[in-house]
Amino acid sequence: MYKIEEPIYFSLFTIIPILIVVFLLVIWWKKRTQKKFASLELLNKIAPNTSTFKSVLKFVFFIVGLSFLIVSLANPKMGTKLKTVKREGVDVVFALDVSKSMLAEDIAPNRLEKSKQIISKIIDKLGSDRVGVIIYAGNSYPLLPITTDHAAAKMFLQNANPDMVSSQGTAINEALELAKTYYNNDEQTNRFLIIISDGEDHQEETKQIAQNIANEGVKVYTVGVGTEKGGPIPLKLNGALIGYKKDNKGETVITQRKPDVLQDIAEASNGIYIDGNKTEKPVKTIEDIIANAQKSEFETKQFSDYKDQFQWFLGIGLLFLIIDMFFFERKTKWLKKVDLFNEESKK
């Protein structure tokens, strides 16, 4: 099992395409300048050992060496031992609404991003609790099974978007049904389901399903995002606004938060409804609820004894840079025989 200690250093890879472009421009400039100075036949007589192939190969050594050095800065680590540990905690499953209405920008930056912020901050407050993530719109989708890996949960969460579900709508009932399959520990006494949505649900049976899941020992809490005044649903192409969603009559659709739907779900399952327009409120409320809940013991497997692997990448990187230093751009006897770029035939 590998993990990266300093992934921020991977941003240095943006330097490489810049260097490649600069190298190609220099090659082009040299060729152009040489043509102005003398004909190709004369250049071959003046500098018979000049090799384009070796210049390219020398640059490749440099790029490969630099790439390995960047990886070494990120410090990859390898888990050398898998062990079973006992932890105490509760099971927390987040059901995130990713329907198109969640793209409305009546709260900044939009409803979906606000929801992600709330979930991410709640996860930061959890201890050894297990988390799972469900996304839903017209149907539901298991984004991440129940796990103790909070970092993975936050990573998967950031990728959640409306394009990940096959149909649009807001079928909270499907998310409730899917959530039942997440709680795989029969001995876990405290199970939480946190639904984050704008409440635009059109399923009449949702309230009954919420009551059924509560009877199975799952505490359901709902968080509403968006405003009652509402806002249009933006349509974007490559990040640029191209218009707003319209109905069959050609009028702009205004999507509104429906707190009554979320309140009914919470009441049916003995939970509470929380206004999510201010991030701190749902984070603090749910943090207190989970902190005061009885913790159950469970077993989990995890890698331990992570060892640094940066030295391997550092060594390989330095090796390529040393080769680059001692690699000359002039032709050698073996290269003249290979004549990869047909340079001899041009003389």
Image (cartoon, helix red, strand yellow):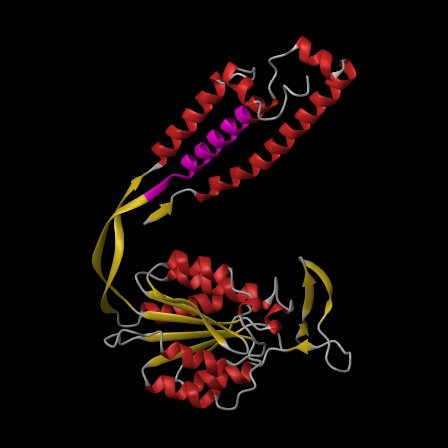
- Most prominent secondary structure in the magenta stretch? helix
Q: Nearer the viewer, residue 140 or 57?
A: 57
Residue at 44% across / 86% down in the picture?
267
Q: Is residue 69 magenta?
A: yes
Image point (36%, 62%), residue name:
126
Residue 151 lies left or right of residue 325; in this view the side is left
* Residue 208 percent location from the top left of the image: 44, 90
- The quarter of the displayed image where residue 213 is located: bottom left
Q: Is residue 271 magenta?
A: no
In the figure, 9 relative to 237: above or below?
above
Quarter of the image that includes the C terminus: top right
Task: Tell whether 24 sits left or right of 293.
Answer: right
Q: Residue at x 47, y 81 (%)?
A: 174
- Viewer-proximal residue among 277 and 238: 238
- Decide: is 95 above or below 335: below
Is any atom of residue 272 visible in this view?
no
Q: Which residues, given as a range, are shown in magenta?
A: 57-77
Residue 261: x and y, percent?
Answer: 53, 84
Residue 280, can we see it? Answer: yes
Seen from the viewer's position, the closer of residues 210 and 280 is: 210
Name the side, left or right, on which 193 lies relative to 347.
left
| Image position, residue 116 (x, y; %) | 51, 64
Q: Which residue occupies the foreground of this view, 310 or 53? A: 53
